[in-house]
Amino acid sequence: MMNRRAAAIAVGLLVVLNLLVVFYYVRGTRVADDPFDGSGLGDAATVMQYSHPDFQETEQRIAHQIDILEDESLEESLERLNRSGAYYWPGAISEGGAFVLSDHVDPNASITDIERILSSRRFHKVFFELKELGSERSSSLLKTELERALEDYTVRMTEFLEQQNQSTGDAQNQPVVTVTVSFGSFNYEAGESPAVDLTGARLKVLAIVLLMGLHELRSCEPDVDAIVEKALAQHDQFLSQAAGRQQRQMGIITLMQVGLYSPSVLVTGLTGVRPPEAAKDLPAGLSEARSFPLTPYDALASWFDLHRRVNAVQIDDRKGTVDVEAQICTDAAAAHEWLLEAHSGG
């Protein structure tokens, strides 16, 4: 009886050992054959630390994005910043959080905008390539692209508002502030998609403002200030004419969804293109400086990636990281007052 039991245990151990050998062989083969390995970032043994068997779909989508971006020039990547899907996968860490409806735009909305933009690998690509160009060339490229982006956004926004007003049956007299937009009304394909829509046009404008601020492009101050002016005008358009709290809250929802009024992006952009003391002069409690690590677009695991968020892998920093600092607005009313003063005094 004892010999049979010992034999059974021995057989069991051999089976487990064989299964482990097969598992690691298959896993190692998958990593070695993974599209990432062709990017020159390292051999399979090195790549293993940025790969996890529970996130195969995530890693395949990352590999697909890298393949697309490898074939893009800087100018093409700038143009394609209006593809909305790239901002929603992996997307903002705060995505899905509750918005608080009040008399002002909820600060959480603009935090989400910052994180959506910074999560985009196309944004990473543009950021690092502009960094290599220098301020004069970067300013020229961004100024030109912002002009195009704003024109495209304005056309799409006008069409959107006309469609919304027509749906009320009174296109001539219906106040714009009654436009209602539900949080689920914008369809997008999470990941790389050729689709361009109002959401993508909006986020492209905000992404360029953020790039100007993060690279501290002083010559772009008039351009950022022009976006602040337009955003403040939208704020006034959607909110100041609202009759009653309910209409005001509907206006806030619309502004957060399709407007350029994103305080954290605007404050970060404006303080970045102004002299260094501009950020130091921000009133206490208006915002907090928050650092985000950016990796090159072909990193196997960025700070935002899904398998990185749950600590399944570490950040792939073999090509280096750059910590960028954004002003995350915590007081909506104070941020609005500062933007008004900064624009009028600019």
Image (spheres, rainbow, N blue to C red):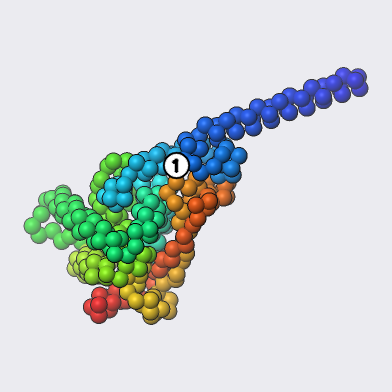
Q: Amino acid at mark 1?
A: Ile
Name the residue: 52% across, 31% down.
33
* Residue 111 located left or right of residue 29: left
Name the residue: 44% across, 63% down.
324
Q: Nearer the viewer, residue 129 or 231?
A: 129
SS class of the residue under badge 1? Answer: helix
Specify the quadrant that holds the C terminus. bottom left
Q: What is the x, y in percent for residue 222?
A: 23, 70
Name the residue: 47% across, 62% down.
323
Q: What is the x, y in percent for residue 185?
A: 29, 47
* Residue 154 located left or right of residue 194: left
* Residue 274 placement: quadrant: bottom left
Q: Is residue 134 above or below residue 182?
A: below
Q: What is the x, y in percent for residue 142?
A: 27, 59
* Residue 326 located left or right of residue 310: left
Instruction: Mark yes or no: residue 167 visible.
Output: yes
* Residue 333 placement: quadrant: bottom left
Residue marked by disc 1: 62
- The outermost residue toward the right is 2
Name the residue: 55% across, 44% down.
50
Q: Nearer the viewer, residue 319 or 331?
A: 319
Q: Is residue 334 above or below residue 290?
A: below
* Residue 271 located left or right of residue 151: right
Specify the quadrant that holds the N terminus. top right
Q: What is the x, y in percent for residue 82?
A: 28, 50
